[in-house]
Image: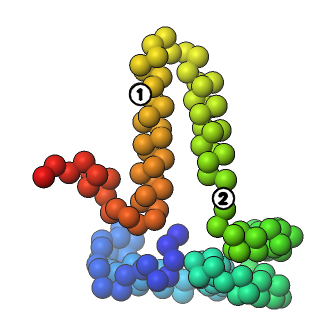
Amino acid sequence: MKPNEELSSTDYKHYTLFGPLPSKAVVDTMLDYSDELKANYNLLQSFYKAFDDRNFDDLEEIVRKKLDASISSYMKMSIKTLRLHLPHVQNSFDYTYNNYRIEGINKIIVLNRVAYGYRNLKTIRTVFFYILRTNQLNHIRKNHKIKHMFQLHKKN
């Protein structure tokens, strides 16, 4: 689900159920169907904003406040879990460290386990570099450094 700021009110696309509409109008139409959906959507959007702005005070306020009766039980359970781990979440806001390198090592271990079926070292190497390259491209795309993966291979 996109953050509300990324929804367009000018770019029209054809939607099967709605016809040609901008994405913001489609979301607004769907939210008009259910108060429960609207309450959950607005709560989720406030989480998006707090995380994107890296504003722990806003996040803590959202988690600590009494929830509306129309909030779904799944969302309430998620907020309860978040409330339980709030000090750890604060650390992630305060420090820029993460465990992506360790997760990369875990992928190498999994690849090694999968590689027992291959006879050729060249094939294993190709699969390994394909996985690494795909992960790098996904990381770059998430940080909006490129818009399309083919721009990396553009010939001048």
Q: CA distance from mark 1 to mark 2?
A: 28 Å
Q: Residue at x 30, y 71 (%)?
A: 14
Q: Please state which of the two labelled residues, at mark 1 or mark 2, is closer to the viewer.
A: 2
Q: Residue at x 47, y 38 (%)?
A: 131
Q: Quadrant of residue 26?
A: bottom left
Instruction: Identify the residue shown where x is 55% and y is 15%.
Output: 117
Q: Is residue 78 above or below residue 50?
A: above
Name the residue at 29% across, 78% down. Answer: 12
Please rate how many residues cluster around mark 1, counting C-alpha atoms within 10 Å: few if below 14, some from 14 to 19, many from 20. few
**Colour style of the rendered protein structure:** rainbow
- In the rendered structure, which disc, 1 or 2, sits on the residue that comes first in sequence? 2
The residue carrying mark 2 is 98
State the SS at label 1.
helix
Residue that protrudes farthest toward the right in the picture? 84
In the drawing, does residue 120 fall left or right of residue 55? left
Q: Secondary structure at mark 2?
A: loop
Q: Is residue 144 left or right of residue 40?
A: left
Where residue 124 appears, x then y in whole percent? 47, 23
Residue type for callout 1: Thr
Residue 51 occupies quadrant: bottom right
Left or right, 144 with respect to 86, comes to: left
Rendering coords of residue 94 (x, y %): 71, 74
- Across the whole image, how many numbered discs are drawn on residues? 2
**Circle 1 sits on which residue?**
126
